[in-house]
Image (cartoon, rainbow, N blue to C red):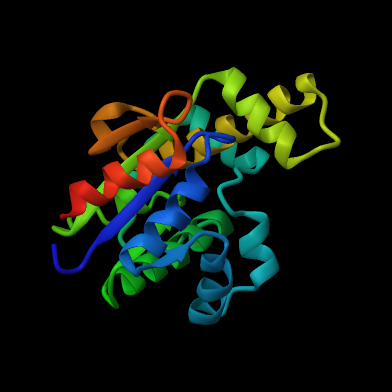
Amino acid sequence: MEKKIITISRQFGSGGHLIGQKIAERIGAKCYDKELIKITAKESGLWEDLLSNMDEKPTNSFLYSVAMDPYSFAYSFDNSNYGMSLNQKAFMATYNTIKKLSEEGSSVFIGRCADYVLRDNPDILRVFVYAPMETRIKNVMERFSDLTEKKAKDQIVKEDKARAAYYNFYTSNKWGNKDSYDICINTGRISTEAAVDIISKLLD
């Protein structure tokens, strides 16, 4: 693949962000995670704070919509803002930004349904990074030194639940389902460097 597009979906605390950064460095691609918020705000005219507050985070009304119809938006959106909620407008702004950036060159996108947004791109490699709970608790406690083991686990459960709800609502796939990805990597068994090596070889 001349132009290389990698999407990284990840369980909270699995190290997916770091893998995304390192694979981008390895292949000379741009890596987009939180940076997408600033770029999307500039491109769409939506407030950066608004996009940040809604970034992979469902609101109570959003969760109600998911409970009523978990795939409703995936089957109905037409890239028009007419009749959309603020959450949906924020998603579509991010959707359009991801599409545009993917056309500019090799890129690594972390989260934000990028694997679904770019599902028809022939250059895409879709990766899901996961790990056993004990590994993720250890990683989260190292990252946030003030968290107890229980609080770290609670945070992991909360973040994963939010990401799954967000993804399942905006796509016709199920977050974490192996059929939605080209490769799934268990960082409880495979080191960051080994994961980067594996992904790099798949891109050759």
Q: Nearer the viewer, residue 107 or 58?
A: 107
- The residue that appears at 41% across and 44% down in the rendered structure is 193
Whether residue 82 appears in this view of the structure is no
Residue 151 coordinates in the image, percent (x, y)? 78, 25
- Placement of 123 over or under 134, stated as above or below: below
Q: In this rendering, would 159 be left or right of 6? A: right
Q: Nearer the viewer, residue 56 or 90?
A: 56
**The quadrant where residue 181 appears:** top left
Quadrant (top left/top right/bottom left/bottom right) for the C terminus: bottom left
Residue 4 coordinates in the image, percent (x, y)? 23, 62
Count of number-bearing discs: 0
- The residue that appears at 68% across and 56% down in the rendered structure is 53
Residue 76 coordinates in the image, percent (x, y)? 32, 49
Q: Nearer the viewer, residue 153 or 197?
A: 197
Residue 95 coordinates in the image, percent (x, y)? 39, 62
Whether residue 177 appears in this view of the structure is yes
Quadrant (top left/top right/bottom left/bottom right) for the N terminus: bottom left
- Placement of 193 over or under 46, stated as above or below: above
- The residue that appears at 26% across and 36% down in the rendered structure is 183
- Placement of 2 over or under 192, stated as above or below: below
**The quadrant where residue 144 appears:** top right
Q: Nearer the viewer, residue 156 or 166?
A: 156
- Placement of 55 over or under 140, stated as above or below: below
**The quadrant where residue 63 appears:** top right
Residue extending furthest toward the right: 146
